[in-house]
Structures are given as structure tokens and as C-alpha cells.
Image: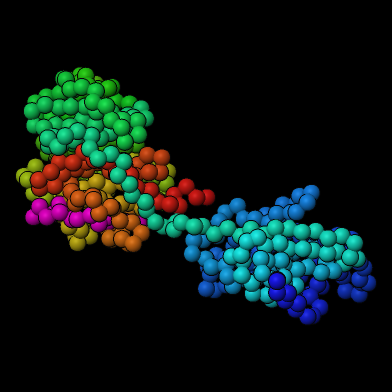
Amino acid sequence: MKRILYILGVFVTVLLTGCDNSSGSTSTTSSVAQLTGFAFAANDSMPGLAQAVFTVEERIDTGLVWNKDSILYGTKLDKVVPRFVFQSTPGAAWLTMPDTTCVLTGYDTLDFTQRPIYLTVRSSDRTVTKTYEIRATVHTVDPDLYTWTQICEGIYPPNESEQRVVEKDGQFVMISSNGFELNAYSSADGASWTKTGQPSGLPAGTKVRQIICDGTTLYYGQGNAVYTSTDGLTWTAHSTTFTIVTMLQYWNNECWLLVDKEGYELGWWQTDSVALTGLRPDGEFPVSDFATVTFSSASERARSMIIGGFAENGKSLNTRWNFEYSSHTPENKGYRMQEYSIDRPQFTSLTGVSVIWYNNQLLLFGGVDDQMSYFGRDILYSTDEGLNWYPVDTTKNRLPEVYQARQKQTAIVRNNTIYLFGGQDKTTTYSDVYTGRLNSIDWQ
């Protein structure tokens, strides 16, 4: 038998918001029994509860009250105070729950975890009755949790020494090297791969981790030539008047590289020649095993960073070269570069890391320090665009136990999903693929 909680008191004109009767007016009865608004009262122990937006949907029979955007994960609805807004002050209103019927007072603390819950409204002249079902939805998954999954155990047998993955025309393209020959693979989803052949036209000693892509064309630089390919298999050499030290990144619609011109200078590859930028590093600059990441700053300027790596003399670097492009005013227009570790030297020396921009922050994976000690499986993050770095909360973001600490993996973000490809540790070169995704990345 249902329990009936009848709470005495005159509640319909004071506690249940209805029509506004001007002072001195005479109250009249109404044949309207319509709910126009619903919300939960603020509760300090449940942040965001009062901000939940509910829609009142009128229907021919039973109306529906529901929230399009779920209430924050973990919010408890077992002790909440509902607020109702009516088109006209009702004669009576009560909630029917699985084991309770409660006549409303406006101060009721109720359990809204029960289903179903119905609100019945009776007009003040007692001629009309309307019923609404109330559905309060709370997110059932933690919005701050990252879900990691291995989607491919291995693209090829563990006999390659290095690999590089780029995204080209909606496909993943991997080029691997075993020190003697190169192999190319492609995949539409990162899970199923096809060996497409052995690349030709690249020079001996090609360092595949220095291959970059603009989305349609792959680039590699060595000596006095830049090599390009539209399929990853057939490469064409383009002679240059400069010595190419390394390819850097594709950023801000330019293919960036480092040249040796009486010292280092940054340049762009433009169709068939190198255009120098005038940017000359005034400190140690990496030539291999560095990480690059591109993003838009909080000020909506194009930004990129080149992190760690080895200097030409073999030194493991702790550098974080920041690049920014400004187009806001004529006097400030152009590229700038700054070395963050001059002011923030606590950043450790590291090589073979991967860095991405995800969820408005930088995430750093893998790598080794100057003693070739692996960082482990923990991920670092930066919310201030690379100035300071901290370990992530491992209760929210932790790679699977099967994932081995490594360096020289490739990290790519596609469709709000993180892809981690391969890498190597002291004994094994991996060609596995993992995906990671923040639960709330697509929530509005």
C-alpha cells in the first residue's frame, strides 16, 4: 500500500509560483491546470543542481518534464527540493512516486531517484486535472574519465627499429624502418592495416621519424634535398641550395624545416625551394627525437612548440621552443620564437616524447631522460600552454596495464580521439595502437 504524506498548510498561493495578483485585487478561480516551469533548489553540497534546465512538454494525455543535458555525474537526487511554476495558481498539486504520494508545500525534500514520478495539478475551480511525468537524468559516466583501449595488437612483426605515422587524406599512413629497408602501411581506422609496399626514392639513412605531412603530401629533408610523396611509396627529390638539418612540423599552412646557413635558421618549403624566415635560434636547438605540437592559444593566435630532443652534439635537451604567429595589428604581425626553459629550467631533459593538444591542454606521453631512464606510463599535462607541467590524476587518466613504458611513439588526435602508435623500449619495438577519449569531450 502506498504511504500518503499530506502536508497541511495553505501552499498554493505562496509556495507554488503562479499568477501575480496585484495588491488589493480579488482572487478568482481558474480552470487552468498547467505546469510551465520546473527546477531544483540550489544545494551547496550538490554544485550545479540549480543550473539544470528542464523542458516542460505538453502532450494530449500525460505531459513530460525532462532535462536535455544530464546533471553532473555523481549528483545525488535522493534529497532534493523541487520548484514548480504554474500558469495559474492551482487548487492542489501532488507528486505520486512508487511508494509515496506527497502533497506539495514548496519546502519538500524528496527522493527523485525513484521512477516513475508523476506530478498531478488540479485547477483552482477543481474542473481540470493534468498529469506530468518528471524525468531527472544524471550522467552515468564520469565526464573527467579517459577511456583507453588497445585497438590493434601489432601492425607488423617486431623487427622494425623505428616508425612514423601521419594522417593523410583521412587515412593513417605508417612508414617503418629496420635500418636496411623501409615499409609502408595504411589504415582507415587504426585497427586494421594493409601493407602497401616499400617506399622508393628516399636517401640511404632516412630517419623516418622526421617525416611530416600537410594532410595530402609527405615531406622529408636530408642533405641538399627535400623529398615529397603523395602516397608514401614514390618519393621525388627536389634540390636545394641549403643543407637541410631536419624537417620540423607542418604548422600555420607552412612546411617548416631547419637549415644550416652559417648557423641554424628556420625556413619553409615552398613548392620547389626553401624560403628563410629570419628566425635563428639563439640557444641549443634539437635536430632529432624532438616532439612537436600545434594549437591555438587562449588569445586565438597560432602556436606551436618543439620539445626536447637531441642537439647536434648528442646532448639531451630540456628545451621548449615556443612559436607564435600574430596577425592582429601591422606592428605586431609576424612570427616570434621563445625558449621557455630559460625561465623554467626545472623541466627535465627528455627525448622521444609525443605531445598533443587535447581538451584545451597539452598532454605529453612517454620518452626518456638524459640517463635513458623511461618516464613510465604516466602522462604529463600543461594547462598554461607549455610553461608548467604536472602528472595527470591517474584515477581519471591512466593507460592500460598492458601498455609498456616507451619512447618514439606517435600521437595523433582525430575526431576528438587520441591515437597512440607504436614506440620502443630497451628491448622491443612496438607496432600496437591504442585509443583514448575523454568521456565529456563531445558533451555540449
Q: Residue at 21% across / 30% down in the picture?
A: 175
Furthest-left residue in this view:
313
Is residue 344 something one can see in this rendering? Answer: yes
Q: Residue at 13% across / 34% down in the picture?
A: 160
> At which x and y percent is residue 43?
57, 72
Q: Nearer the viewer, residue 359 or 86?
A: 86
Rendered position, 163 above or below 341: above
Q: Nearer the viewer, residue 213 or 65?
A: 65
> At which x and y percent is residue 10?
81, 78
Q: Residue at 22% across / 37% down in the picture?
A: 154
> At which x and y percent is residue 226?
19, 25
Residue 427 lies in quadrant: top left
| Lateral position of residue 330 relative to residue 247, left or right | right
User: On the rendered image, what quadrant is the N terminus found in?
Assistant: bottom right
Q: Nearer the viewer, residue 169 or 347?
A: 169
Rendered position, 180 above or below 355: above
* Residue numbers of the magenta segment: 368-384
Q: Is residue 383 magenta?
A: yes
